[in-house]
Amino acid sequence: MNKQTTFSDILDSKLKKKLEDSLAAYKQLKPGDYVYGTVIAKEPGTLIVDVGARCEGVISGRELKSKVIDVDSLQVGDKVLVYVVTPEARDGSLVLSIKRTEEIKIWLDLEKAQRNNEVLEATVVEVNTGGVIVELENGVRGFIPISQLDPSRIFESGKKMYGKDISSVIQKKLTELLGEKLKVKIIELNREKGKIIFSEKAVILEDEYNRNKEMLKNVKEGDVLEGTVTAITPYGIFVNVGGLEGLVHLSELSWDKVTDVSALYSIGDKVKVMVLDIGEGGRRVAYSIKRLYKDPWKEKIKKYKPGDIVEGVVEGVVDYGAFVRIEEGINGLIHISELSDKLVRNPADIVKPGQKVKVMILSISETERHLSLSLKRVKAKGNKES
């Protein structure tokens, strides 16, 4: 026979349900958890922290020490990150630690700095072939690649930055940075791999962007401006126009081939440039110098046409033929198949650098600014006429 449900049973079940709901509302903590809590009491050598668990947590002894948190300045009501040592000790208390949050606190702060685009100060402590290793105030180390350093630290006017000398010059410049304090931003952060990549260039670009906001409203592609050369690199020069700094790429310096940038420009030179492109809100600007002038090739080439026989000088001999200069800025290639009506295995057997030759123009490429030439057809034509 079923037992009759009494009012007392109903009351007990309601109380039990209420207790279970109340317990479920508390955080279910386990050893190793990181949680934020509120300081509710502070005594000498002890902090009592509410983390939303069944009971308050206790932090005392060595677990109260920290290199990244000023424990002495904590006051009742302050929020603090804690580590769960024991969810429930023998006496029923919750044992917490501030000391064991040091590493995670550092990474959380770094993630916040990256998220907020903060500028940090880092000291150069080591140098390698790819860049420099820097250290923050909290002892955390990261890497700045050469590409993310201020270009003016590496490249300067008057230095030949080509060939075998370039690596030794760059290495010397990097070594000079040891001990220097740099303003940097975090551009890559990976907690699992312990990897941090900083950028000094990002700080410079941000500063320039802020300075250039007003100027950008009045500058557009095609504008001709006057600026100052601020850096010389193997791939071109940097020019600053009223704070708007951009690159004149090697290919935009001159209509002629440029092999030594430092022979053309020095830091501080005043130059006129044309705006080619403004990207990323002024963080990336491309200038041109050569487009301020007419392409001399187009004028010079007008007097030549396919079939013409012209005289030139052999400038170089390669496996596939020979390069010939017809006049300044007008060059062409005699392909190996156009050197002789006989089989040619080595072009050097037919022509030598510095040799004057008569060649026939086979074709003119305006896109490549180059001529296709023939030596054998001039000889064949000469034989027919004789």
Image (cartoon, rainbow, N blue to C red):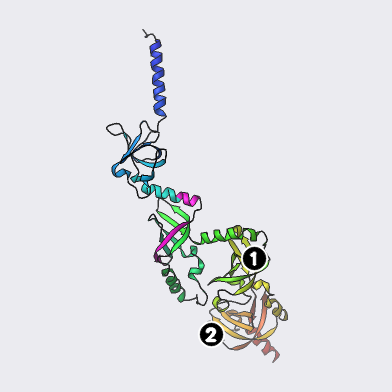
Name the residue at 68% across, 86% down.
Answer: 381
**Is the Cβ of the residue at disc 1 closer than 8 Å to that at disc 2?**
no
Front tag of 1 and 2: 1
**Element type where label 1 sits in the image:** strand
- Which contiguous range is marked in magenta? 111-128
* Residue 84 percent coordinates (x, y): 34, 39
Marks 1 and 2, how far apart in space? 43 Å
**Image location (x, y in percent) of residue 34:** 38, 41
Is 82 magenta? The answer is no
Q: Is residue 28 above or below residue 198?
A: above
329 left or right of 175? right
Residue named by callout 2: 348
Q: Secondary structure at mark 2?
A: helix
Q: Which residue has dot 1 on it?
A: 276
Mark 2 residue type: Ala
Q: Which mark is residue 141?
A: none
Relative side of 180 to 60, left or right: right
